[in-house]
Image (cartoon, grey):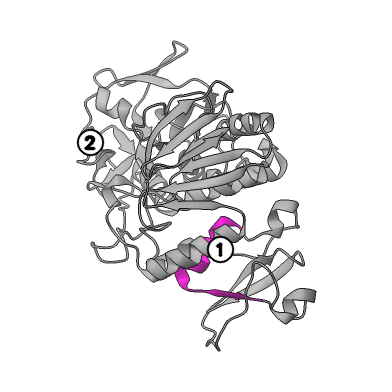
Amino acid sequence: MNKKVVVIGHGMVGHRFVQVLRERDATDQWQVTVLGEEADAAYDRVALSSYIDSWDRDTLALTGNDYAEDPMVTLRLGDPVVGIDRTNQTVSTAAGAVLDYDALVMATGSYPFVPPVPGGDAEGCFVYRTMDDLDAIKAAADKSPGSAGVVIGGGLLGLEAANALRLMGLAPHVVELNPRLMHLQVDEGGGALLTRLVTDLGLTVHTSVSTQAIEKAADGTLSVQLSDGSTIDASVLVFSAGIRPRDELARECGLELAERGGIFTDLGCQTSDLHIYAIGEVAAIEGRCYGLVAPGYTTAEIVADRLLGGSAQFPGPTCPPSSNCWGSTSPALATRTPPPTVLSRSFSMTPPRVPTPSSWFPTMRELCWAASSSVTLVPTGPCGPCSAGSCPRIRPPSSPHRVRRSVWARCPTMRRSVRATR
């Protein structure tokens, strides 16, 4: 008789777990049920900003995310779990279904942190996490083309959100509490370079200020009041102030949590309940959360191995405990600074795909990589104005550099690839 494993969450890591388990379960030991909160099957959340290029949800869909040809997997979308009964080993969903399990895998991920700003729940305020969020932001932006849009938070995701507002026809403002953008990832010089790069793209940057209040004006616009006394009148505001593990289900059913949030697990991703595992951003492995997909995939593979009788363990970070090894924005790692080697991995660039209007400009990840790695973007060869060093957004080096690394960016003037050297 088959054993039953229930997976709560159908994001990238939850999908990876199902894929790995089914690939390795040669004797069909486990019957899998996946419960997803969103109406969409697993999609590439890392590439969420590329959704703006086509507004086609299928472009982000992960391969095989519907398990249509696998009778051992049942996928239920749009039916979130509302309770876990550890004694009877069942989960209850919003639609009233009660499912029993032999093993339960928590892959609930994280949620966007919204600072406790007065007026933060006003109409026109959004977060930047799902395709539904982007659809809602676009609908609001389309009502006031050319107006200002505000992003609260100057991290990587905040800059991507600001660029998305720009592509939607708004004039983006980025508000950052710290003295520079991406303050955990770049030093003062890198922050200055990054500010210059994004300002050239049309973003307005406000650093060392906080948001005091958000008020809805009579004409429907948002009045965003900053701590320096200035006010920004905007049609859209996006919160991008970090993420927090979605551990509320675990808390309600009495699982042990980490000191700063997340479901506490051992190196085998097993929780305080021997029948329950946690993977991805919600897993606090020996008390530490990791906020990137790569370690999340590792946890998925570990749990798949464990369910099939293996003894895989999480390898742990590859840099000293004092470093934020995965570039995580998790609260558990919020005070740590990542080493350059990790940053260069995190922000590595690849040759652009078939050019689209939005890809004529360097992406936010490319700009952040440049700033964090002290890279100067230079053209690879003659390409019109760039050959003379007059490209408005990609500048030649002011002094000779020894080339230690070559990556690719996009030339906004000639719509072709250029190489970044360092």
Callout 2 amino acid: Leu
Q: Residues within 10 Å of mark 2 (few under 14, many from 20)?
A: many
Number of callouts: 2
| Front: mark 2 or 1 | 1
* 315 falls in the magenta region: no
Q: Residues within 10 Å of mark 1 (few under 14, many from 20)?
A: many
Measuring from the top left, give residue 24's x and y in whole percent: 47, 46
Residue wearing tag 1: 197
Q: Residue at x 23, y 46 (%)?
A: 287
Q: Which residues are magenta?
A: 363-378
The answer to whether residue 125 is seen in the rendering is: yes
Callout 1 amino acid: Leu
Residue wearing tag 2: 257
Q: Secondary structure at mark 1?
A: helix
Measuring from the top left, give residue 209's x and y in whole percent: 37, 47
Q: Looking at this rendering, what residue extends furthest in the front direction?
A: 229
Measuring from the top left, give residue 89's x and y in whole percent: 30, 21
CA gap between label 2 and label 1 equals: 41 Å
Q: Main secondary structure of the magenta part?
A: helix
Q: Secondary structure at mark 2?
A: loop
Q: Nearer the viewer, residue 129 or 287?
A: 129
Residue 221 sits in quarter: top right
Q: Looking at this rendering, what residue extends furthest in the right direction?
A: 384
* Residue 416, above or below 290: below
Q: Nearer the viewer, residue 77 or 212?
A: 212
Q: Residue at x 66, y 41 (%)?
A: 168
